Image (cartoon, rainbow, N blue to C red):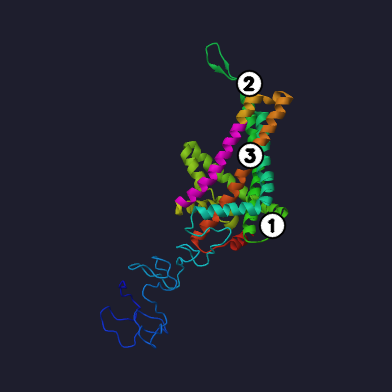
Amino acid sequence: MPIVPDQPGYDSPHPGAPNPAGQPAWGAPPGWTAPGDGPPGHTPQGWNAPGTPPPGWGGPAYPGYPMPGAAYPVPGAAYPVPAGPGTYAGWFPGIDPQDPLVNPPHAGIGPWFARCVAALRRGWRQLLPIVLLSQVVPAAVIGVLTLVFSPEGELATAPDGAPVLPAGFWGQMFAFYGVLLSAGLVFGLLQAAGWAAGTWVVARQAAGEPTGLGAAFRYGLRRALGLWGWTLLVSLLVMIGSCFCLLPGLYAAFALALFGPVYLFERREPIGRAWRMFHSRFGMVLGRVALVMAVLVASTVLDAVVGGISGAVFGVEPMTAVGTAIGAVALAVFGALLAAPAYLAQQVGLVVTYAEQRAQEGPVNAARLAAELG
């Protein structure tokens, strides 16, 4: 048996010193009977036979007690609970291992992914219409506007061999980007309402509360303006970072990815909180956000493939004829529909990632998060 070092507050004598008769050793609890006391064959209270692990023993993690040489927890302070059946070392009191939304600390990527899949299974009937209306429809409209207002004409060659822009090129270019920017601003408000509505559905369903499309959209519209404003600011920061180099812009996109859930749940400094969450647990948040970004990148690649097929089949100026225009518009709408699963994965993945980061900071569950949405 290892010798436990003397600690302040223990009422036993130093190792090797005589122990007074009947005095339990090492701060035994009241009612404990010293080995050898009681009638023959009687197992004293609190005594375990040699080779039998004490109650609550879960392996070499010294449950409930620090390892030899480690500091004892401060009385009354919140500290991670010991590992046990169905739990993980490092959990805070109040963490529910079966919570459908909150992945407990140190549970790993597997339970995080399982909660994302479970959220999709619970809420796809409400989330899919929200995504179609608030994300796919704007993407399809912008795709059609791109076909309509895309600058026409091809580069010509001057007698001296220099390239010559087609007539009216700059006017068409300004009109093209002006239309896209205006559409992006208008549809951005609808997209923000959709993200808020989807977050409301995911959180309330995890808490076992009723959800409906009408109530979800009403909540989304209430929060849309604020979320839209923060989205514009984050997009501007990412764009500024990309102007210096692609890497700073990409880094800003990852570091600020949780600004939406932070704003919806906490209503305070979403950029600062998202930045701190990302850097406090860099590897964890980076891994989760990278998986979400990978789905978005795959969706973008599919859309590019559909666009390439459209250009190869209907030409670079499909809107000049009715037949090619109908085909190009149909493919643009189809490409937007292909992005729907990516929007669903982004919605659910970011909410579950945010809930996991809240559990890293203290006790939280799905019911509390749903209540915070208001």
Q: Amino acid at mark 2?
A: Gly
Tags 2 and 1 touching, CB below 8 Å: no
Please indicate, yes or no, whether residue 223 appears anywhere in the rendered image. no
Q: Where is residue 333, by image quadrant?
A: top right
Q: Is residue 116 magenta?
A: no
Q: Amino acid at mark 3?
A: Leu
- Label 1 packing within 10 angstroms: few (<14), some (14-19), many (20+): some
Query: Residue placed at 26% from the left, 84% from the top?
Result: 18
**Front-most of residues 166 and 287:** 287
Residue at far right of view: 322
Q: Position of residue 11 (x, y in %)?
A: 34, 81
Q: Is residue 300 magenta?
A: yes
Numbered label attached to residue 338:
3
**Region of the chain picked out in magenta, as a range:** 283-306
Mark 2 vs 1, N-terminal side: 2
Quadrant the N terminus occupies: bottom left
Numbered label attached to residue 153:
2
Q: Position of residue 227 (x, y in %)?
A: 61, 50
